[in-house]
Image (spheres, helix red, strand yellow):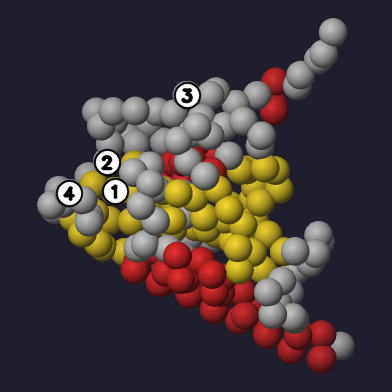
């Protein structure tokens, strides 16, 4: 007999439909997503050597290009809950959600619609073998530079740049503090 902890169970079905979707005052659908990341060296927290930071990208459902996990923010959840849910559904990872990177307005490439997108960094602590969209998406860890090259959305590339800049600023502040000691 195999015992499985309830906390590690994941519903293998993604939420669907638009009846709970949030829209802003201009009628733009609100979406949220994450930039899942990790350091190549476990327990690493700095960017001392090039290439230590990796980000996780996923394939588009339509199979054209790569992107970060994102999807609709629904009325029955907070922005953070939506970001965590979408990342689990689309990329099959869990972790520590960090401070919001910002808000972007963008136009859909496939629909004639405008959106409002919010992005968060997610320090990945667990990568699942099975997740809701495993059969319709591929996921791949890569360097920040590689992600900038393959990501199909400009607004997501901007979020990635903001994230890397934030990490560099945090590291610089930490180094200044250590130098004062």
**Could you tell which of marks 2 and 1 lies nearer the N-terminus?**
2
Q: Residue at x 53, y 24 (%)?
A: 12
Query: Does 132 sit left or right of 126 as displayed?
Result: left
- Residue marked by disc 2: 22
Q: Residues within 10 Å of mark 1 (few under 14, many from 20)?
A: many
Q: CA distance from mark 3 to mark 4?
A: 25 Å
Q: CA distance from mark 1 to mark 4?
A: 15 Å
The answer to which of 178 and 168 lies nearer the viewer is 168
Asked if labels 3 and 2 touch by Cβ distance under 8 angstroms, the answer is: no
Q: CA distance from mark 2 to mark 3?
A: 21 Å
Q: CA distance from mark 2 to mark 1?
A: 6 Å
Q: Residues within 10 Å of mark 2 (few under 14, many from 20)?
A: some
- Residue marked by disc 3: 13
Asked if labels 4 and 1 touch by Cβ distance under 8 angstroms, the answer is: no
Say which mark, if any, is on residue 111. 4
Asked if labels 1 and 2 touch by Cβ distance under 8 angstroms, the answer is: yes
**Could you tell which of marks 3 and 4 lies nearer the N-terminus?**
3
Quadrant for residue 8, please give it.
top right
Q: Position of residue 79 (x, y in %)?
A: 42, 46
Q: Secondary structure at mark 4?
A: loop
**Pair 2/3: label in front:** 3
Say which mark, if any, is on residue 30. 1
Q: Which quarter shows the N terminus?
A: top right
**Could you tell which of marks 2 and 3 lies nearer the N-terminus?**
3
Q: Secondary structure at mark 3?
A: loop
Q: In this rendering, does residue 80 appear at all?
A: no
Q: Residues within 10 Å of mark 4 (few under 14, many from 20)?
A: few
Q: In this rendering, does residue 168 appear at all?
A: yes
């Amino acid at each position: 007999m195999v015992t499985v902890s309830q906390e590690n169970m994941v519903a293998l079905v993604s939420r669907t439909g638009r009846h709970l979707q949030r829209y802003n005052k201009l009628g733009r659908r609100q979406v949220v997503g994450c930039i899942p990341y990790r350091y190549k060296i476990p327990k690493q927290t700095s960017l001392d050597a090039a290439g230590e930071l990796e980000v996780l990208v996923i394939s588009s459902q339509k199979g054209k290009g790569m992107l970060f996990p994102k999807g609709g923010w629904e009325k029955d959840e907070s922005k953070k809950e939506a970001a965590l849910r979408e990342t689990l559904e689309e990329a099959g990872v869990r972790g520590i959600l960090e401070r919001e990177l910002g808000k972007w307005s963008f136009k859909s490439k496939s629909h004639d619609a405008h959106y409002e997108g919010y992005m968060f960094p997610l320090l990945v602590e667990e990568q699942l073998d099975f997740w809701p969209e495993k059969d319709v998406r591929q996921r791949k860890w890569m360097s920040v530079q590689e992600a900038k090259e393959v990501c199909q959305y400009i607004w997501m590339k901007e979020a990635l740049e903001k994230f890397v800049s934030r990490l560099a600023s945090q590291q610089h502040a930490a180094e200044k503090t250590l130098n004062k000691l």
